[in-house]
Amino acid sequence: MYDYLVVGAGLYGAVFAYEAKKAGKKCLVIDKRDHIAGNIYCKEIEGIQVHQYGAHIFHTSNKEVWEYVNQFAEFNHYINSPVAVYKDETYNLPFNMNTFNKMWGVRTPAEAQAKIAEQRAEYHIENPQNLEEQALMLVGKDVYQKLIKGYTEKQWGRDCKDLPAFIIKRLPCRFIYDNNYFNDRYQGIPIGGYTKIVEKMLDGIEVRLDTDYFEFIKENPDIADKTLFTGMIDQFYDFCYGPLQYRSVRFETEVLDCENYQGNAVVNYTEREVPYTRIIEHKHFEFGKQPKTVISREYSSEWKPGAEPYYPVNNDENNALYEKYKALADQETKVIFGGRLGDYKYYDMDKVIEAALRTVQKELQ
Ligand code: UDP
């Protein structure tokens, strides 16, 4: 009946379906939620686009991807510059001269580098083996202890020694006074929200919401020639090798009767004792002037069945377990996997688009 059954109406599934349709293929997109757009879904509250499943800031250095996504939305000039609160101190992120100046009173790059070198020398780390060693090497112990350790351990629920170094390499460390969180050439927030992007991608494609794949496929085993599955790969195989680990996030969203609550879209709470990791004030992503504001506190937890999986925990054990599932996936002739959950990778949105385009192009060859 269909060429493709696309499981998951998130960004990966939508790009795939859009391209497949353009090539004349008939797709059915299903999603177990009651809305499209997966975790980039935005809901308008008080005239503000609220990122229901966590803040999403589009950034990329890939011009093709930037042009691709600009077909579906116009982007504003938002530049992510989070602020970190540690006890009664406030710092700029990512780690840059503003951070170092506030931390140590240093003014020049040479002074900051000397300070970090002095702190680094205490540890004799040559080849960082985990996130803690990587962080100490990069910024020294003061920044590590105040801005990284507590935040990371809350976010991942694991000791920094048990986490892979690559997680912290996502963040720039620079010796200029520049609070731009990303190094990428292009950045912004889609005007009107992310849901509209996915709506446009899925325009003219049949979508069924509130539809759980595992039940649906029992009743409709021959619905499509092929399936693109963007859900959890371990669940697809009924956890036969055991479950992969994910982190989940709980959002406590509040409408406040004030115009401007925290003066910034993202404020991270980096001490362990504050139970949430960050507070998002959504209106600042779009320079909103509404009389009210909407904030979300983010609480991180280990994923358990029934919760939403957000972040794959890409440590050695999980990556090895994923490889076993991947070996099963590689034998499939009628099922393809993709996205953060299908590929078990900590993808950003631009990487999701890149991967989806690569998959669909290979598929349509
Ligand atoms: N991180 C940190 N302190 C911060 C912000 C980030 O230590 O104030 C570390 C933490 O380990 C986190 C990683 O950097 O998991 C990546 O942060 P990013 O903001 O990229 O996470 P995301 O936005 O994907 O949740």
Image: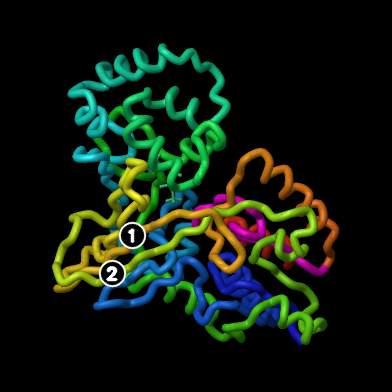
The answer to whether residue 64 is visible is: no
State the mark number for residue 42: none
The answer to whether 238 is drawn above or below residue 134 in the figure is below
Where is the C terminus found, in terms of image quarters?
A: bottom right
Task: Count neighbours of disc 1 (C-alpha within 10 A) and say few if under 14, some if 14 to 19, many if 20 or more.
Answer: many
Q: What's under tag 1, amino acid-wise?
A: Arg
Ligand 1 is in which quadrant of the figure?
top left
State the mark number for residue 254: 2
Q: Is residue 347 left or right of residue 187?
A: right
Q: What's under tag 2, amino acid-wise?
A: Glu
Which residues fall within the magenta stretch? 334-349
Frontmost residue, 41 versus 74? 41
* Residue 280 location (% of width, % of height): 31, 59
Q: Are marks 1 and 2 in contact (CB under 8 Å)?
A: yes
Q: Is residue 339 magenta?
A: yes
Provide the residue designation for mark 1.
297
Task: Count neighbours of disc 2 (C-alpha within 10 A) and say few if under 14, some if 14 to 19, many if 20 or more.
Answer: few
Q: Is residue 270 left or right of residue 313?
A: left
The colour mode here is rainbow
Q: Residue at x 49, y 34 (%)?
A: 160
Q: Residue at x 54, y 78 (%)?
A: 33
* Residue 294 location (% of width, % of height): 26, 68
The answer to whether 166 is drawn above or below residue 15 in the figure is above
Where is the N terminus found, in terms of image quarters?
A: bottom right
Q: Is residue 281 left or right of residue 213?
A: left
